Structures are given as C-alpha cells and as structure tokens.
Amino acid sequence: MSSIASKRSNRRCNKGFAITSQRVMSAALLAIAALIFDGNAHAAANPGPTARPPRDWIVETAANEILMLQHSGTYLRYRMHVVDQKGDQVRDVIESKDGTVARLILRDGRALTAEEDAAERERLNDVLASPANYAKHVKNDASGKKLAVDLIRLMPDAMIYTYVPGQPPSGRGSGSPEVVLDYTPNPKWSPPSTTAEALTGLQGRMWLDVKTHCMVRMEGQIFKPVNFGWGMLAHIYPGGKLELEQTDAGNGRWIYTHFTQQVTIRALLLKTLNVHTQIDASAFQILPGEMSYQDAIRLLLSTSAPSH
C-alpha cells in the first residue's frame, strides 16, 4: 500500500511541477506583451513611433503596467473556447468584482447532455453554498497575477528590444499603422529567481497598433532549453511556441482573443509532458456595472444553455 501511495504522490508532484512550469512560460509571454504594448504608448506621442530607445519606454512604464494588471473597472461577459488535454470545451464567462466565474455550455462541439448540464449546475450551486470553494479559485488567479507582476518588474533588464522595419501588418488590427518589435534575452542578465529562468529561453516578435498604442499580436519561441532548479524541478525543451492576440472589447478595455502554447516539459526528471493548449475568446459584452460573484453565478444559471 505504501508503494501505491508513493506512486500516486509522485504523479501529483509531476503534474504540479508541469503545470507550474507551463504557467511560468505563459506568464512570461503575457508579461512581455503587456509591458511592450504600454511602453510604445509613450513613443507614439513623439514625432515618430521609433523616436526613442525601446528600453526607455519599458523603464518608464513598468510601474504603470503593473497597475493595469488590476481590474480596469469595465466588466465583461464572453465565451471562452479551450482545447487542451481535457478536450474541447466552451464556457460562458462573467467577470465579477470578486473575480471570474464560468459555466460549461459546450463540449466537443455539442450541447451538454441533460446529465452534464445538471452536474455543471450542481457545481455552481456548490460554489454558492461554499465561499471557501470560490476563495480557492480566487487564490489561484491571484497567484498567476503575482507571477506576471514579478516578471514585468524584470523586463527592462531581462530583454533586449529592437525595431523590425518594413514588416507587413499583422492583419489582425484596425488597419492603422503598426510598429513591429523583436525581443530576445539579454545575455548579461542573471535571473534572480527560479521562475525568472523562463525569460532566458524566450524570444519573439510583436505587432503594435500605432493609433491605439495597443499590442495586436505577439509570437514567442522557446529557442533553447530552460531549466528550473538546475533541471531537477522541471526542464522545458526548445522548440515550443506561444502566440497571443488582443482586441479592444469596448470602452478601451483590451483583452486577449487568442492564445496558444505548444510546450514540452519534463517534470522532476521523471515524466515528459506535451502541453498543447489553444484558448479563444469571443462574443464580448460590456456589463452595466460590477456585481458580486454570487450574482454572476445566478446570472449564469438563469441563462438557457445552447441546444446545439
């Protein structure tokens, strides 16, 4: 019995380290995207979008970008389509003043069965009945946000940023001119923490809308191995890819519309996992005001589920 318990414990640890490594790489990409976008807002006010050294913009806007990670005051409802190792799922998502809540409405391209819908309703009602369950969800969200904040603070020194003139537009913006930047790790920079190691293996390119000063698209590649804890905790193999696209959902509230990652991770020197995730957000609605997570759940439950 002790051997079985030990194996189960190892599987949980492997999964935990793999998920943490995956979140670190995702947060690294999102942090770079957020920081570079806001940095270029300052440059666009000058005679030309490339009139200032990129690092100057990053140094000046790092503190502001961290504040922007907090809620902007515009609350959204939208659909989130996730395809990963768990399958193909679509959720109805509502942002509350306490955090997000979501209801599963489609699975593998079909409406939920009566049994599946009943189980989802029961899950949401359990959250209503037990604030501790929702507190755990909020804690996980806060952990991811803190990780992004920590990485943003390192951006000015961790990366080198260069203009890429003459590049075609992303094809996903509003049609206004775009600035294109490449980013690559600074070889003179030493990561101050284990999670910061993620930045040493990531490079890529982003497209910025000059008119709105918004990051329209970003690409990242894991171009060399990344080790966490000298490879003892986790090892991320080169060749991984990440993509991020954003849009203005209304009232100047920018949010992602597409995010993909293809990453191969070895956790605790034992198990190698291929993480393929695609997330698409659409059908954005601006809510009339803030609401509690309880009211958000009640709104989800009162909405008729799709029939096909």
Image: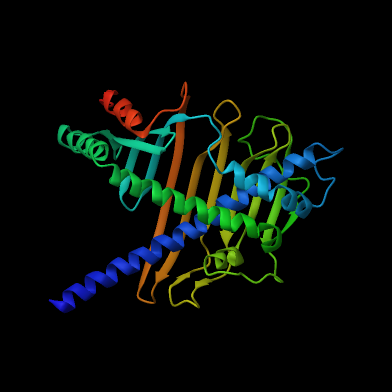
Question: Relative to 270, does residue 273 appear above or below in the rendering?
Answer: above
Q: Which of 82 and 65 is in front in this view?
A: 65
Q: Residue at (43%, 34%) from the top-left corner?
A: 95
**Picture coordinates of residue 60, whole percent (x, y):** 74, 49
Left or right side of 76 for 300? left
Left or right side of 163 for 32? left
Which residue is situated farthest in the right direction here?
Answer: 47
Left or right side of 101 for 33? right
Q: Nearer the viewer, residue 271 or 59?
A: 59
Which residue is situated farthest in the front direction here?
Answer: 131
Quadrant of the frame with the C terminus: top left
Which residue is situated farthest in the top direction here?
Answer: 288
| Rendered image quadrant of residue 270 | bottom left
Q: Residue at (56%, 41%) from the top-left corner?
A: 245
**Picture coordinates of residue 230, whole percent (x, y):** 50, 78
**Picture coordinates of residue 157, whole percent (x, y):** 70, 62
Which residue is situated farthest in the left direction here?
Answer: 1
Quadrant of the frame with the N terminus: bottom left
**Picture coordinates of residue 66, whole percent (x, y):** 61, 47
Q: Nearer the viewer, residue 145 or 109?
A: 145
